Image (cartoon, helix red, strand yellow):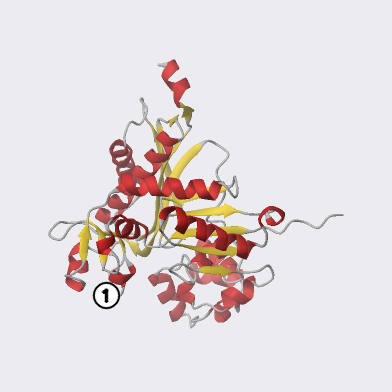
Amino acid sequence: MAAAVQPVFFHVDMDAFFASVEQYDKPEFKGKPVIVGALPGHRGVVSTCSYEARAYGVHSAMPISEAYRRCPHGVFLPVRMERYHEVSLRIMEIFAEYTPCVQQISVDEAFLDMTGTRRLFGPPESLAAKIKARVREDTGLTISVGVAPNRYLAKIASACRKPDGLCVVKPGEEERFVGSLRLDKLWGLGEKTLLRLSELNIRSVVELRAHGEASLKLMLGNAAGEFLYRIARGIDPGIFSGEPKSRSISAEVTFEQDSSSEETLSRALLELSHQTMFRLLRESWRSKTVALKLRLQDFTTTNAQRTLRHYVSSAEELHAVAVSLLRSRWDGRTPVRLIGVGLSSLEPLESAVQSE
């Protein structure tokens, strides 16, 4: 009997994507602290900033006033979502040359299921290096790639050697890899969860592993306990599943810090709405059903949807419905760790036109 094929997943993250595109398009900004988002003097937050800006403590979702205070000499630029989508599309086309299983989860990151491609392209590490080189050659940008037997570990690995990084977790090394990380490097753990773990005298992955699943659920609740039990052992907790069977398009973002600011959540939904509508039009679909996804601080997940009487026609309309769903399902106080927006029950554009 032939041996089972070992799963291989790549998580690809475009390094400081919006800022990197701006530095590529405007070479005079290379090496400078570029901050993309709201402009100084206006309300709003940082969408993305270059690594030069991060050296001053600037990060995404930071209020633009604080970013200006920390880095007044920075290059502040507005978001050019159409241009970022154009570059993102080209990079996704490169990925599709190596696998048909490309799961784009935001404008600047994707999972590639590379299971069973060794005979075609060689070992995963050399293939990842080849894809990195292709992206740099075609777009002038760098990407970081994590390679692992499951999506969750690939996500963590891609962040380990940024920027322009490549980190491989081999089969059988899952627990060793996770055990080598600080708790705050485990993807999905917010500040308040880390504080609660510290109060329980759990300050390392090894100490976390010492607790059984029942014990963690008792201390932290069912959802959080199950999540922590799995990730401490390198087991995929199932956050990043494959594309759903029903036809849908969605985008989501996990905040670096849990947020209870409606302004921050609304701005995130606007960017996600642009991403979703871009894919909808690019792939020639229409939809009347808007979906919202929320994951709260305690890892509980809430989904809501609304079906309109007409097809969604713009990112602004999608955003307005998503914000309405947010206000109906969120108490305005509980910190949010993840937010997503999507369109489901898709119809081919041509059939939708014919049915009108």
Residue 95 in the image: x percent, y percent? Answer: 53, 50
Spot the residue most to the left: 41
Image quadrant containing the N terminus: bottom right
Give 35 or 171, whichever is nearer the viewer: 35
Q: Is residue 50 visible?
A: yes
Image quadrant containing the C terminus: top left
Quadrant in the picture for residue 127: bottom right
Q: How many marks?
A: 1
Residue 315 in the image: x percent, y percent? Answer: 32, 39
Residue 164 in the image: x percent, y percent? Answer: 46, 67
Q: Residue at x 49, y 38 (%)?
A: 248
Kind of residue at badge 1: Tyr
Residue under numbered circle 1: 56
Is 301 left, or right, of 73 in this rendering?
Answer: right
Quadrant in the picture for residue 321: top left
Q: Residue at x 15, y 61 (%)?
A: 40
Depicted 49 relative to depicted 348: above or below: below
Give 119 or 64, whichever is nearer the viewer: 119
Depicted 264 relative to depicted 217: above or below: above
Q: For label 1, count other residues whose C-alpha is less than 10 Å away and answer few (under 14), some (14-19) or many (20+).
A: some
Depicted 119 relative to depicted 33: above or below: above
Residue 56 in the image: x percent, y percent? Answer: 26, 75
Is 49 left, or right, of 154 in this rendering?
Answer: left
Local secondary structure at mark 1: loop
